[in-house]
Image (spheres, rainbow, N blue to C red):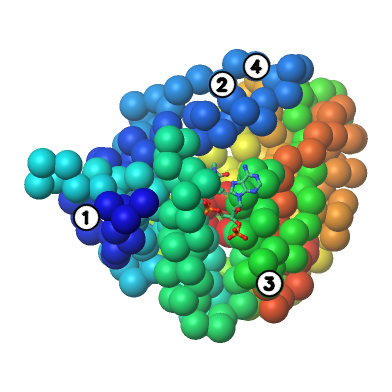
């Protein structure tokens, strides 16, 4: 263990950190896969590139929250663990966290989490947690409340899709009110994360500023992040995402205060599943809100 150093991440760590992340989550997903679920596939080259792009962005915005555990072999550092956290205004979030299976259970995860949490400097915090017993133990001991999440899966029955009105495509000049809504729901705006998401995702917003809301939809028609001032707007935004869903779809990160999303999923004939936790400290569980796995 002594040969492992925990230090701030640098840009040249990204390829080796990505490989560590791919191996760690492949093994973790294999270990927690239910028999009814498909075999876990290794991360694709497209997803590897997206991981590196996203982490480079985090490193550019808030480098002091990005930590790696490294081993030095023949003069080169090899990543064996990573904890990428970020502060946005008064909110801290954890974008990703892992230790290579071959190095788990040796206290490296604790050292990484201590470094990331020191960066929070007492801010309220939020992240999406796996069910890994080492991870959940660490989070609860750090004062986070773990809220179980549901997810809706299946193929949308298109005969159930309602006519949805009052929405339009979102643009960069919507970010200001979107940040205000974020602030009401989860302590702080997403700030620069909105620009990053708009580059890669479709943004749909509520036309009515008195009942604001927005959803980012990925290229497979899945809602990646949804925020609204009230349930009815949230439901219309989720229906819009479901209308563009292709094949098997997924609505993720649904906590009990967000049962409005379960009701939409059931009406579309999706099935309820269960997946991990939303971990929060010193803040309520956001609602009406479906968190983004990476930007919370
Ligand atoms: C979660 C993870 C990062 C922890 O890293 P690690 O280096 O194994 O953690 P540590 O050795 O520092 O142990 C952390 C704590 O969990 C406990 N722990 C570790 N593995 C455990 C296990 N399999 N079962 C129960 N407790 C465990 C340790 O005893 C320790 O508790 P303590 O500090 O009170 O003694 C690592 O296991 C991992 O990458 N898991 C797979 C990916 C994942 O789930 N990431 C989290 C995403 S939110």
Q: Would you call the spot at circle 1 few (<14 residues within 10 Å), some (14-19), or many (20 or more)?
A: few
Rounded to the nearest angstrom, the CA distance separating label 3 from label 2 is: 32 Å
Cα distance in 3D space between marks 1 and 3: 31 Å
* Residue 166 in view here: no
C-alpha distance separating marks 3 and 4 = 34 Å
Residue 233: image location, x then y, percent: 78, 58
Mark 1 or mark 4, earlier in chain? 1
- Tell me which numbered mark, 3 or 2, is placed earlier along the sequence: 2
Which of the 4 image quarters holds residue 47? top left
Residue carrying label 3: 143
| Residue plotted at (70% across, 20% down) | 37
Q: Nearer the viewer, residue 204 or 122?
A: 122
Question: In the drawing, what numbered circle is on residue 11?
Answer: 1
Quadrant of residue 188 within the rendered picture: bottom right
Distance of label 2 from label 1 (alpha carbons): 29 Å
Q: Residues within 10 Å of mark 2 (few under 14, many from 20)?
A: some
Disc 4 to disc 2: CB gap under 8 Å: yes
Residue wearing tag 4 = 38
Camera-near label (3 vs 4) is 3
Distance from disc 4 to disc 2, alpha carbons, whole Å, reads 6 Å
**Is residue 192 shown above or below 293?**
below
Classify mark 2 as within 8 Å of ligand 1 or not, answering yes or no.
no
């Amino acid at each position: 263990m002594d040969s492992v150093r925990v230090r701030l991440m640098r840009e040249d760590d990204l390829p080796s950190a990505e490989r560590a992340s791919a191996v760690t989550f492949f093994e973790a997903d294999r270990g927690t896969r239910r028999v009814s679920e498909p075999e876990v596939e290794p991360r694709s080259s497209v997803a590897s590139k997206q991981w590196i792009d996203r982490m480079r962005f985090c490193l550019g915005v808030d480098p002091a929250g990005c930590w790696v555990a490294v081993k030095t072999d023949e003069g080169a550092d090899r990543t064996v663990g990573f904890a990428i956290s970020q502060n946005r205004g008064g909110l801290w979030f954890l974008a990703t966290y892992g230790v290579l299976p071959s190095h788990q259970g040796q206290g490296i995860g604790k050292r990484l989490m201590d470094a990331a949490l020191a960066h929070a400097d007492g801010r309220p915090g939020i992240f999406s947690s796996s069910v890994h017993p080492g991870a959940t133990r660490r989070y609860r001991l750090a004062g986070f409340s773990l809220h179980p999440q549901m997810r809706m899966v299946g193929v949308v029955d298109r005969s159930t899709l309602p006519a949805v009105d009052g929405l339009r495509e979102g643009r960069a000049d919507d970010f200001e009110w979107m940040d205000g809504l974020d602030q009401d729901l989860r302590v702080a705006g997403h700030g620069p994360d909105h620009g990053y998401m708009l580059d890669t995702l479709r943004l749909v917003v509520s036309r009515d500023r008195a009942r604001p809301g927005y959803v980012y939809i990925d290229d497979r028609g899945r809602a990646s992040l949804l925020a609204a001032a009230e349930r009815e707007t949230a439901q219309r935004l989720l229906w819009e995402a479901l209308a563009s869903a292709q094949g098997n779809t997924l609505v993720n990160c649904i906590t009990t205060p967000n049962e409005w999303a379960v009701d939409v999923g059931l009406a579309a004939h999706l099935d309820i599943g269960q997946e991990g936790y939303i971990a929060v400290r010193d803040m309520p569980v956001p609602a009406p809100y479906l968190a983004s796995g990476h930007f919370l």
